[in-house]
Image (spheres, rainbow, N blue to C red):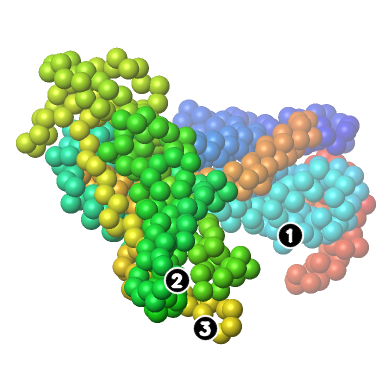
Amino acid sequence: MPVGEGLSSATNNKEGQDVNYQVLLDGACSSESSRAKPTRKRCVWSSWKSFMLDSWVLEIVSMIFSTACFIAIVAVLIAFNGKRRPNISYDLSLNTIVSMLATACKSSLVFAVGEAISQLKWVWFQDRKELVAMQVFEDSSRGPLGSITLLGHHKGRSVVSLGAIILILMLAFDPFIQQVLRYPTESIAEQPQTTNTTGSENLAFAPQIKYFDSANVSKTDWNGASYLGVWSSDFGIQPQCPSGNCTWPIYKSLAMCNKCADLTSVATLNCPTPEWNSTGNASGSYSGKCEVVLPQGHSSATTVTLNVADGTISNTDLQTAMIWEVYNEDDKYDNKTYLNINRPQMVLAEASLGLDDDKIANQSNMVPGIYIEHVTECAISYCIQDFDISVHNGYTTLQKGSSDFGQLLSLNNSLTGITTLCWAPSGTPSDVRIYTSTIGNESIGLNTSDFVFCGFNSLSSDAFTGTKLDRYFIADGNEYSKTPARATPANVARVMRMGLNLTMEQTSAAWTQMGLQNTNITIVGTMYNTEIMVKVQWLWLILPASLVLGSNIFLTLTILKSKTRVPWKSSVLALLFHGINHVDRDEHSTNSGMQTVAENLYVKLQYCDSDGRVMLSGR
């Protein structure tokens, strides 16, 4: 009879009469093998015990429980991934919950895999094997160290090697689970609780200019901002951002803009020698024009002065650098265009003059040697710009888009019927409607939805315009030297050092900042608070998931391999009831002695000739 059948049945005589082995194990419920009549409760318990011990129910339930725990871990991670770190009752943390589930998952896996390895031990001895393999299997079912030994014996060529690998890798189960969760800090958008007040602590506000009005922004304010633009460069926008981290959608706002260009190639110099009587013994100062003329607009209106003594030019005073107003709002009805800006609010020019000695024929008269070194023209106007504002860690960043310099239109007030000059963005129709709005003590025409406004202040150029006067005289031979004839005003000298282009950029920013500080129109933005977030690193779950899957596969293979045999698994009683037969009776009282004998003893599960029991036989 095959040995496989011997694990489920036994013969009680040499003639091979079959006696059900299960009946022997359950003899407590048999009237023939019991002196006392068994109770129903005892029989039920015995049947239940047989069902649990002689099947794979516990291992299957354990594997299902382990898989469920792992699925629960994944579900928890999915539920909280990308969200704020939760505040759980009883001071539990998300790590604690995941760790508890992971411990339950791992413990169930170790139990099921260990039992499967123990069962494969009995399958292994269906063929003649070294007795020491019994100890190798037992050690492997108990932990990673024994599993390493088993892999060395089996060289990875048996099913049980899969279980050994799983138990070894199980050492990394907890560390990998611990690496799954990270808690980075991120900026989370806060939902505003109110939208009708700029004083709310839960809102982010950025100012917007829809008109420059003469009521809230006086001429003194404009002049002050002009000087601020000359002497400072720190201009920007100051939005309300309680958290220090806010963003706004890109929005349009009125601003002050400038555009500059080099006009040296098109500028001309009108500088004739002043008339004076060179035949007599004349003495005195004789002045004449020495001005820079541009294609349109006002010239520099500067002069050159010959200082004469005893009929000879002793020295010459020349305005070698100058900044003047080419166009202002008094000229706005001229309908002229400067630097592609139609009727700007103000146009300034900066020029410098030099002296070319080679062009001087009469060394006493240097005027013919004067020439233009460079000319820069800048136009300043209202404009519409796209504002891209953000605040990060309390630092405000403002990115401005392209500028629309707009146009001046003569518009009719729909209420008063009065026609007035108004500023409007480019493309605004000439029949756009404006309305009278009272701001402070003044009434001005507005159409805020279209950025149209009337009644603006004239810009003053006092902070920028002026000249630098130098005195030239012959120092040695034919060479001229110069010295300042008078002190240049400090603000004008600074503009000349910086250059008109940079000065106008700073001043435009100062004027825009002034408008932003005086407006009561705001744009609502999004405020962000720094929160601790849950971030799941899914790659760290690959190993735990592989162990769960591998354990299920390993248990399934073990069950299939043992389907014709009663699963003894890790039962110690199996060794007691089916001990070694036909082995020397010498007593081996030490582990080392038993180990030595076992290494040289080959055994096999087979029927005992004497009593028909299935035992490990040394024959």
Comes first in the chain, label 2 or label 1: 1
Q: Residue at x 50, y 37 (%)?
A: 78
Q: Residue at x 23, y 53 (%)?
A: 223
| Residue 220 horizontal/vertical position (percent) | 18, 51
The number of numbered badges drawn on the structure is 3
| Residue 520 horizontal/vertical position (percent) | 19, 39
Looking at the rendering, which quadrant does residue 259 occupy?
top left
Of circles 2 and 1, the one toward us is: 2
Q: Which residue is mark 2?
A: 279
Which residue type carries mark 3?
Answer: Ala
The residue furthest front is: 280
| Inter-mark Cα distance, 2 to 3 | 24 Å
Q: Which residue is mark 1?
A: 146
Q: Residues within 10 Å of mark 3 (few under 14, many from 20)?
A: few
Q: Residue at x 85, y 37 (%)?
A: 3
Which residue type carries mark 2?
Answer: Thr
- Given residues 283 and 348, the one toward you in this image is 283
Regarding residue 180, the answer to whether it shows in the image is no
Q: Which residue is mark 3?
A: 475
Which residue type carries mark 1?
Answer: Gly
